[in-house]
Amino acid sequence: MSVHGPLSSVEAPKGCRRCPRLAGLRKSLRKEHPDWWNAPVPAFGDPDAWLAIIGLAPGKEGAHRTGRPFTGDASGEMLFATLTDFGFANGTFANDPDDGIALAGAIILNAVKCLPPENKPTGAEITNCRPYLGKALSALPDLQIILALGKVAHDSIIRLSGARLVDHKFAHGAAHQLPDGRTLIDSYHCSRYNVNTGRLTATMFEQVFEQAVYLSSVS
């Protein structure tokens, strides 16, 4: 079964069962909330993007419910505000998949495409989903910069690249040259917890976007 989205030809099928625990959670939630998306969440954004933003996984009240990354809960507020400030977003973000917002030059994906219990995918689940992330990134012909939101996304990108994690440690604001010529930039995840605790501020988040814009201009 195909899914809608800018990279539909390489997305996970809506009935994907690679991860029995995640498939079981989808099944139980489908009974409770039959009107929710309840499926692997496809990428959202521009298929000609030069910037790819990689999150962790869908949130229960967010993308798992709405079917659009970082939409439906608090996690997307800082992300879409920053995308708007840097000219990547057209329209007004209303935290609803029907708000009509579109991205230009950027695309949003997740390292794990299905909702994990307590937002904590297992190592096996991250590994199972990694090929979908790899196919999606390979389908972006103009991609230059990858922004990893958190260590799980960072580790998945490094493993996909063939580089060694020991040589590329996650750190907010760190930039890593990948073997294919693309650049990975790390950021703390813009989760409500990180924002509310001050681990990630709006200024810190803007700085990694400034870094991405600068690196794209000199590459």
Image: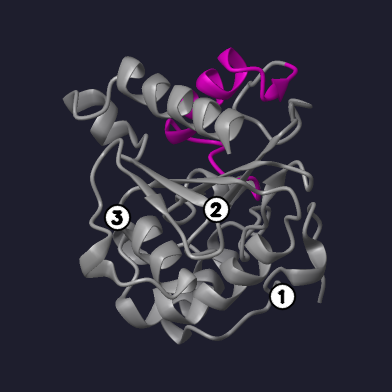
Q: Amino acid at mark 2?
A: Arg
Q: Where 116 sits versus 124, above or below?
A: above
Q: Position of residue 158 (x, y in %)?
A: 39, 65
The residue depicted at 33 percent of the width and 15 percent of the height is: 203
Q: Nearer the viewer, residue 67 or 134?
A: 134
Q: Amino acid at mark 3?
A: Lys
Q: Where 194 sits versus 166, above or below?
A: above
First of labels 2, 1 by sequence position: 1
Q: Which residues are magenta?
A: 67-91
The residue depicted at 48 percent of the width and 81 percent of the height is: 128
SS at badge 2: loop
Find out whether residue 75 is within the magenta segment: yes
What is the crowding at mark 2: few (fewer than 14 residues within 10 Å), some, or many (at least 20)? some
**Real-space CA distance between mark 3 and mark 1, rounded to the nearest whole angstrom:** 26 Å
Q: Nearer the viewer, residue 130 or 60?
A: 130
Q: Where 84 sits versus 137, above or below?
A: above
Quadrant where the image shows the C terminus: top right
Return the residue at label 3. 151
- Residue 72 is left or right of residue 143, and the answer is left
First of labels 3, 1 by sequence position: 1
Q: Nearer the viewer, mark 3 or mark 1?
A: 3
**Real-space CA distance between mark 2 and mark 3, rounded to the nearest whole angstrom:** 18 Å
First of labels 2, 3 by sequence position: 3
Q: Amino acid at mark 1?
A: Pro
What is the crowding at mark 1: few (fewer than 14 residues within 10 Å), some, or many (at least 20)? some
Return the residue at label 2. 182
Q: Position of residue 198 (x, y in %)?
A: 19, 23
- Do the residues bearing badges 2 and 1 touch, measured as CB atoms within 8 Å? no
- Residue 38 is left or right of residue 119, and the answer is right
What is the crowding at mark 3: few (fewer than 14 residues within 10 Å), some, or many (at least 20)? some
**Real-space CA distance between mark 2 and mark 1, rounded to the nearest whole angstrom:** 28 Å
- Residue 5 is left or right of residue 85, and the answer is right
